[in-house]
Amino acid sequence: MKARRDVYQAIADPTRRAIINMIASQPHNVNAIAEKFDVTRQAISLHIQILTDCGLIKVKQQGRDRVCEAQLQQLSEVSAWVDQYRQHFESKLDAMEQYIETIMSDRSKNKK
Amino acid sequence: METSNTKDREISLSRTINAPVALVWEVWTKTEHIANWWGPNGFTNTITTMDMVPGGEWNLIMHGPDGTDYKNRSVFKEVIVNKKIVFEHYAPNFIATITFEEQGDKTLLNWHMLFESAELFIQVVKTFKADEGLKQNVDKLEVYLEGLK
């Protein structure tokens, strides 16, 4: 089975999120990243491979170093969908406001 | 590497409602009212239990426009009249905190939802993304409500 490679998969793992956070401010080489985590070098390589496949990082060869750079444009896809999801709850609040308005106008009519 | 930062698994909304806090509380806590606006637009609701005490259950069934029923189960954690409601929702697991602040004749409502994990939150957002039908229904109802004004 071919694994799905999208931005959601990229950020679904805590180590991968931590790697993105780490390189978001400045590029790091693969060794520096591996040292920060308490997992095997192979595991880090796999995470970096997945992040690369998902388009969230670019790995550049600089002399002996393999340097990882963040490509964060992709993340806007996620935030756009989170916004949609938020919007869904905003519309719930809209529905509540509408409903309250109806009640208030009914009650003020009954008073008169 | 996980920190206590919850930004990647929460949603927060706030709104000033043009109604006194007692009325806003009433439409949140009385089944005959909440059934009228809860759930995605275009859905209707049947509330089977709403026992608003800490540990009390809240069971409701949302009826989708296509006839599909969606069961929702929550347990209230904290209930302070006219001030605060906290409930834990199951499947998907999240904690919702709603606070009511009196501001004269108006009410500031804060609504916060904290998902159990970022993984779950992403999963829920993805499911929502997949559900184009739901989005269309929201649009339809908005048009309908505009017409009622």
Image (spheres, coloured by chain):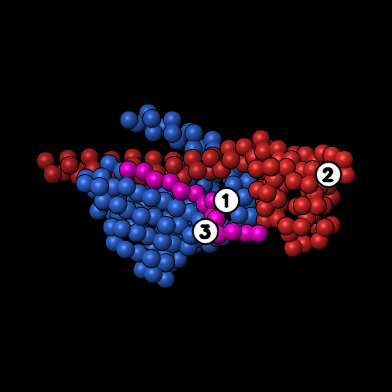
Chain colours: A red, B blue
Q: x and y percent of residue B22 in the render?
A: 25, 53
Counting residues from the N terminus, which is met first, the one under dot 3 or under dot 1? 1
Q: Is residue B13 magenta?
A: yes
**Which dot marks residue A66?**
2
Closer-to-camera residue (B51/B92):
B92
**Which dot marks residue B8?**
1
Can residue B63 be seen in the rendering of this structure? no
Mark 3 or 2, closer to the camera: 2
Q: Secondary structure at mark 1?
A: helix
From this view, report whether residue B46 is shown above or below residue A64: below
What is the three-letter code of the residue carrying label 3?
Answer: Phe
Q: What crowding class fits label 2: few (fewer than 14 Cα within 10 Å), some (14-19), or many (20 or more)?
A: some
Can residue B13 be seen in the rendering of this structure? yes
Residue found at the very far bottom of the displayed protein: B55
Which quadrant is home to the C terminus of chain A?
A: top left
Mark 1 or 2, closer to the camera: 2
**Which dot marks residue A55?**
none
Closer-to-camera residue (A20/B148):
A20
Q: x and y percent of residue B111 in the render?
A: 41, 51
The stretch in magenta equals B1-16
Q: Residue at x 13, y 44 (%)?
A: A111
Q: Secondary structure at mark 2?
A: strand
